Image (cartoon, rainbow, N blue to C red):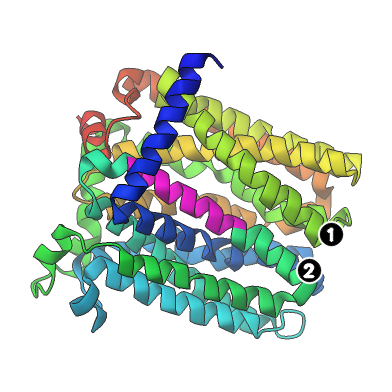
Amino acid sequence: MDAAATTHEHHGFMTLLAHLREDRRYLAMIGLGFASGVPFQLVYATQSAWLSEAGVPLHVIGMLVELTIAYKFKWLWAPFLDRYDPPILANWLGRRRAWIVVSQIFCMIALAGVAFGDPGHFLAWTIAFSVALGVAGATQDITIDGWRINAAPPGKQSVMTAFAEVGYRFGALASGAGALMIAQHFGWRVAYLVMAALLLVGAASAFLGPEPELDKLHHGEKTHPGFVDTVWTPIKDLITRLGPLAFPILILIAGFRMPGYLTSAMAMPLFKSLHLSNDEIALVTKSFGFGIALLATFFSAYIVQKIGVMKSLLIGTAAGSASHLALAWLAGHGNEFWAFCLAVGIEGFAYNFAQMVLIIFMSLIVSKEYAASQFALLTSLVALPGSVLAGFSGFIVERVGFVHFFIGTSLIGIPVALLAWWVWRQHGSAHWTQPGAETVDAAGAAGH
């Protein structure tokens, strides 16, 4: 890296610190991002280690990926969170922040419910509270995205997003590595109760952040459109702006992370089958993976700026899928610790690179007026196909083994990469070469 690039990165880092000191919205965004990063892994990914220890069969663990179903269908109620006030708290905090606190309260209750369960003897209890946790966690994501978009003007959205990502990474680290390490030494009940307590960081951040001016304008309004209009209007707007390429683009988004969802469902059972301890898994997949994720985040931003979003999407889906071959190699190689680190590093870097490029792409095609609803729709679309197929992953592994399973998931990326190439060629990359632009400007360019 040359001196100019180093100076630019240093200047950018110092600028972020200056923003953090000057505006409490940014500090609140870190805390809210942290809270957003906690629930999802505890619904399924981290929980799968508990289920494995409890003796739950592999095919059941694979099917329990459906516990995250709320994240796939959050677009159904996201528009109502844009338009309706929660009782009591809205008079004090405003619409967005009140919904954030309400969702966090329900997250804490659901986490406590999971904590006092016993999946080895009463799996239904764990399933019920995990579904509730998924609904509350998905609602929290919707409301935090809505607050982020409305709390700052367009010129500050990129900084808000950067702080949100930093917070989210630390939240995911806590609910991943932190929960696994606590469970290793104090048990799963303590781990889940500690995670519930950590959500107080998000609640405090909701009080710290200011009420968006747009929320003040809409607070207390009594006239609301009907159910169909509330849900359909953001969808219609998105499809209209994307024009003839709407269907191919939505198919591309739906299939982009499909291989990743399949791999995530069986990664933890693979590691446990290699007799790796919770501490080893936490150290490599969460702590080491945390650094890998941040590196991939910065690298993806650099690549998108250099070659554009559509080319980056093509690279992301190809690299993200091909990286699963590293897990296939690990499954056949054994449980050497260095091999574990290498495989997780390769797969984690490619996964996070692809994920960040996809987020940038989706941010470019949503409109500002319906940003929260449309972003919830697109993220649900990302999750739905892959997680549905992941429900059958345990059956496939039981029949063909881990090696052939991960080879098969890598091949799924081929048709998705071809579709990304086709959309790029049909649309023209010039419309997608402004990743630094704010969402409203980029969406306008993309839609028209």
User: Left or right: 177 with respect to 107?
Assistant: right
Q: Which residue is drawn at 46% across and 44% down?
A: 254
Are the two marked residues, 2 and 1, in contact with CB atoms closer than 8 angstroms?
yes
Q: Which of 423 and 141 is in front in this view?
A: 141
Type of the residue with mark 2: Gln
User: Left or right: 291 with respect to 331?
Assistant: left
**Residue 307 found in image quarter:** top left
Looking at the picture, how far across and down is residue 424, in whole percent? 40, 22
Query: In the image, which residues are magenta?
Result: 159-173
Does the magenta-highlighted stretch encompass residue 54?
no
The residue singled out by tag 1 in the image is: 277
Q: Is residue 226 visible?
A: yes
Count of numbered circles in the view: 2
Looking at the picture, how far across and down is residue 58, in whole percent? 77, 63
Q: Which residue is drawn at 21% across and 46% down?
A: 368
Type of the residue with mark 1: Ser
The residue singled out by tag 2 in the image is: 184
Mark 1, Cα crowd under 10 Å, few <14 / some 14-19 / many 20+, is some
Looking at the picture, how far across and down is residue 258, in whole percent? 56, 45
User: Left or right: 415 with respect to 57?
Assistant: left
Does the magenta-highlighted stretch encompass residue 169?
yes
